[in-house]
Image (spheres, rainbow, N blue to C red):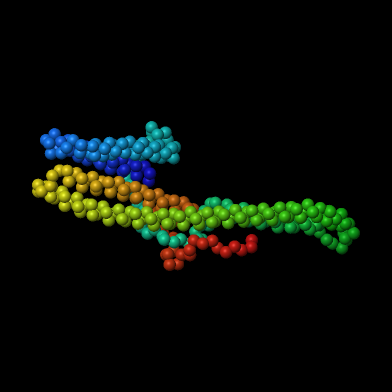
Amino acid sequence: IAAASFTAQAATAARIAAIDRQRLDLARAFVQVGKWPRAQLAGYEADLARSEAAILPLRQQEEASQHVLAALCGVPPALWTLPVPRLSDLAAPAHLPLTLPSALLRQRPDIQAAEALAHAASASVGVATAGLYPSLTISASTLLSLGGDIAEPLFNWQSLHAAKRASEAGLQAALADYRRTVLEAFAQVATMLQAIQYDEAMLGGLDRQQQTAADHLALIRTEHDIGRLADMPLLEAERASLSLDLDQITAKAALDHDIVELDLAMGGGVLPAGGAAGIPPASTASSLQPAPETNR
């Protein structure tokens, strides 16, 4: 996603710089023929300098992201030959959930690990409790020989009780860690769900702005073609449209990134491409709230 985003941003920034160069050339021509004062060139020169300067960081980030892809594929950057897909080719799920059932969080590895540790700590309490009692087999024929076997746990009563208290403290620590892990998972998922809602709202607003800009550009181009408008208004309209394209690229990449982060926050495998299969409808999904604590 990052590589595709930087590639698209760099290409759009280069197109903006090309338009800024045409604007500056046209403005200089106006100054030469005396239509504009020379001071009016400053703004066009500043726009061109900014647009050209914006390309280099994007190219550097594009190459850096491809180096990361090469490392993930186990090859040096010089041998990386696979093309990076276009951002428009990266398909998001057709339907993104607004809520998710909390039971899906149990597939997260950190929650499974914390739950396993809590089970182990609970078992250790049982082992320590069993150690308080003599370990022997009682029968009528051996009753007189049991004195030492029974006395040994009684003499070590304090140390055995200390071991039991230590096991209980370990259980409380494991339960606290389990609770912290679950709460952090709830927070991560809720944050990503909210981020996706903001991303979709932002992208929707930009889509509407871009449609308006496209309609305006089409009108300006028609007026230009029939000779009613000069070149500069057309260049200004094209630049405005490309600036919105740049914002759309950033918003689309942010949405795709947050979708992946949501999938990771849920433990993976929850949001397959092309749809939210396996996710109950929002009306039947429980809210992301921790279940009431129970004694374990």
Quarter where residue 116 is shown: bottom right
Quarter where residue 86 is shown: top left
Quadrant (top left/top right/bottom left/bottom right) for the C terminus:
bottom right
Horizontal relation, residue 157 to residue 14: left or right:
right
Judge by depth and name the residue closer to the eye, 181 or 18. Answer: 18
Counting from the top left corner in percent of width and height, residue 139 is at 84, 62
Counting from the top left corner in percent of width and height, residue 237 is at 20, 47
Measuring 17% from the left and 37% from the top, which residue is drawn there?
A: 37
Judge by depth and name the residue closer to the eye, 144 or 214. Answer: 214
Judge by depth and name the residue closer to the eye, 150 or 289. Answer: 289
Counting from the top left corner in percent of width and height, residue 218 is at 18, 51
Measuring 79% from the left and 58% from the top, which residue is drawn there?
A: 133
Relative to residue 165, is residue 23 depicted above or below? Answer: above
Task: Residue at the far left: name it.
Answer: 227
Measuring 43% from the left and 67% from the top, which residue is drawn there?
A: 283
The answer to whether one can see residue 274 in this image is no
Horizontal relation, residue 129 to residue 52: left or right:
right
Measuring 34% from the left and 50% from the top, which residue is drawn there?
A: 251
Horizontal relation, residue 123 to residue 85: left or right:
right
Task: Residue at the far top: name it.
Answer: 78
Counting from the top left corner in percent of width and height, residue 176 is at 61, 55
Task: Residue at the far right: name it.
Answer: 144
The answer to whether one can see residue 251 in this image is yes
Count of numbered marks? 0
Relative to residue 290, is residue 38 depicted above or below? Answer: above
